[in-house]
Amino acid sequence: MTKDVQAVILVGGKGTRLRPLTLSAPKPMLPTAGKPFLTHLLSRIKAAGIDDVVLGTSFKAEVFEEYYGSGESLGMNLRYVTEVEPLGTGGGIRNVLDELTAPDILVFNGDVLGGTDVADVLATHRESGADVTLHLVRVGDPRAFGCVPTDADGRVTAFLEKTQDPPTDQINAGTYVFKREVIEQIPAGRPVSVEREVFPELLARGRHVQGHVDQSYWRDMGTPEDFVRGSADLVRGIAPSPALGDRHGEYLVQDGAKVGKGALLIGGTVVGAGATVGRRARLDGAVVFDDAVIDDGAVVERSIVGRGARIGKRALVRDTVIGDNAVIGADCELLRGARVWPDVEIPDGGIRFSTDV
């Protein structure tokens, strides 16, 4: 399979919705279930028998190559193409054309956590003879997404923007298979959106756009809430990742981390390498990055604690993002979408939501 198909992963976004974590690292490189998020996607691509991958980079482009290099450690051939100016989804795909030699090109959005079988999407593309195939997932409430209706043969009939009365529960899942010749026709050197420009134009010209529809695991990891849930789903085995093997359970503690007596780790919590969890601390659905410290009796729920940050004794951190090396004092309470920027120090009892101290 490897010679006649290549993969492209678009990883150029700035990840603004995940700030302050993305001030220091691009979103696909943030630790998710103990590994960079991108590693989980690469492992799924590799499992489908594809080992030739081009990364379309932009924001903090050098970080990817510094970490993965040529891809040899993964048994893959990785190459990197950097956008100087943001080009959008379609422009980003067109920008890597010179690195593409295979007739079929799988394209992945670098911030989607998915569970579909990559080989199945490719099989649908080839069996249908389509110019482009889209992976579509069925969701319970499609109003927040672009809807993609298909006919009885699975051909895409329209691309609809977000609407309050969607005609279908099928949404664009951000994975595509292109014939290389279709990528050649995308305008070069300017921003282009596949969703708003390329796909509707293909339909208008009567080209064959096929849907591969399933109900596999799917989550856009763009917000802190989704990032926390996606990480927890990987830890618990709800979202599949060959990179994790059979390591599934209520928590994942990385090598070199220390967990104190009486601490409770549940809800798909991850404790990063070199991190410390104090006695009787309670972590529920927490993503604790490397070298962070959770002091005795602290509670961290559905939150991300950045690298080297410290949560003081008896502090409560819920639905919150703590930046790298920030210090949250003892007895503080941070709730409901709070974000603490890197290196900020909040004194003991400095922020409370309740009156008792």
Image: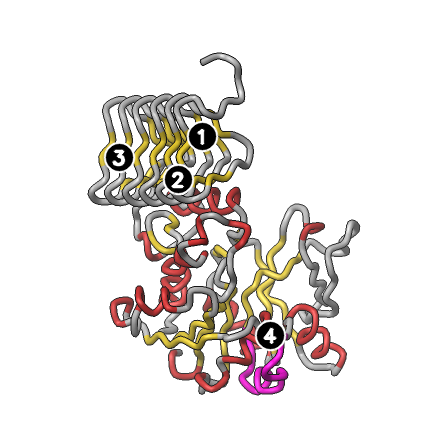
- For the N terminus, give its image quadrant: bottom left
Q: Which residue bears the numbered disc 4?
A: 90
Residue at image location 72% in from the left, 63% down from the top? 149
**Residue 300 appears in the rendering:** yes
For the residues labelled 1 and 3, the Cα–Cα distance comes to 16 Å
Sequence-wise, which precedes: disc 1 or disc 3?
Answer: 3
Q: Amino acid at mark 3?
A: Thr
Q: Which residues are magenta?
A: 177-191
Side of 54 relative to 77 (left or right): right
- Residue 138 rendering spot, x and y as whole percentages: 62, 54
Labels 2 & 4 near each other (Cβ < 8 A): no
Q: Nearer the viewer, mark 3 or mark 4?
A: 3
Sequence-wise, which precedes: disc 2 or disc 3?
Answer: 3
In magenta stretch: residue 227: no
Q: Which residue bears the numbered disc 1?
A: 317
Side of 47 relative to 341 (left or right): left
* On screen, residue 242 above or below 328: below
For the residues labelled 2 and 3, the Cα–Cα distance comes to 12 Å
- For the C terminus, give its image quadrant: top left
Labels 2 & 1 near each other (Cβ < 8 A): yes
Q: Amino acid at mark 2?
A: Val
Q: Which residue bears the numbered disc 3?
A: 276
- Residue 60 rendering spot, x and y as whole percentages: 42, 64
* Mark sitting on residue 305: 2
Labels 2 & 3 near each other (Cβ < 8 A): no
**Quarter of image, res 125:** bottom right
Residue at image location 39% in from the left, 31% down from the top? 328
Residue at image location 46% in from the left, 70% down from the top? 57
For the residues labelled 2 and 1, the Cα–Cα distance comes to 9 Å
Residue occupying the far left of the picture? 256
Q: Secondary structure at mark 2?
A: strand
Residue occupying the far right of the picture? 165
